[in-house]
Amino acid sequence: MGRLTAAATTAVVLACEDRPADSADQSPFWAEDPERAASSEQPRGLILIDRQQVEVIRDRRGRYRALSEAAWQAQKAKLIKFCAALPVGVVVLVVDFAAAQLTASAIIGSGLVLPAPGGCIVAPRSAGLSDIIAACEMAQDGAQDLPSLLST
């Protein structure tokens, strides 16, 4: 979950991901942007989370097997709080990445950002951007709101 943002991840889950616990205190990307604060423009966006990733943590499999029930409950509470703090125009949905043929990525402006070993690949004005956006929109058909998923 730490890949989503450290602001939505507990120190215990970050430890399972071999990430420093102090990265949990980082502010989310929209929290302290002075240019955004000066602008009346509100951020808009869609954050898609792979259902399998949520289930792996919830079921405490793989590198998360050492998480206690209390640690999962703390992580769940932090994710719900994270979603509640998002700007009104930003939506978080949980989708089946495999079924939707998606991979972890971000669309920033008209560019596509893909994770790669040692960093990321940025494809400005990607020719396939419209296809990627269409795949994300199709994935929303089977999506579930993150707080709703966590409450079940």
Image (tube, rainbow, N blue to C red):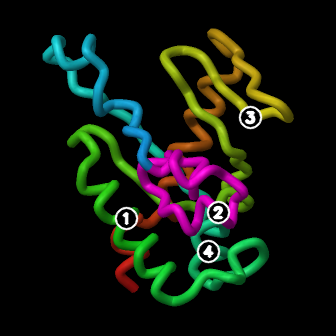
Residue at screen point 83% across, 31% down = 118
Secondary structure, mark 4, is helix
| Amino acid type of the residue that numbered disc 2 sits on in the rendered structure | Ala
51, above or below 73, in the image: above
98, above or below 72, in the image: above
Q: Residues at badges 4 and 1 in contact (C-beta under 8 Å)?
A: no
100, above or below 65, in the image: above
Quadrant where the N terminus sits is bottom right
Residue at screen point 48% across, 63% down = 10
Q: Is residue 21 magenta?
A: yes
Residue at screen point 29% across, 27% down = 32
Q: Is residue 145 visible?
A: no
Q: Position of residue 36 (x, y in %)?
A: 25, 17
Tell me which label, 4 or 3, sits earlier in the chain: 4
Q: Is residue 129 visible?
A: yes
Comparing marks 3 and 1, which lies closer to the viewer?
1
Numbered range of the magenta stretch: 1-24
Label 1 Cα crowd, 10 Å radius (few <14 / some 14-19 / many 20+) = some
Q: Any mark on residue 15, and which? A: 2
Q: Quadrant of residue 89?
A: top left
Residue at screen point 45% across, 70% down = 75
Which residue is denoted by mark 3 in the rendering?
Answer: 115
| Amino acid type of the residue that numbered disc 4 sits on in the rendered structure | Ile
Which residue is denoted by mark 4 in the rendering?
Answer: 57
Which residue is denoted by mark 1 in the rendering?
Answer: 78
Q: CA distance from mark 2 to mark 1?
A: 16 Å
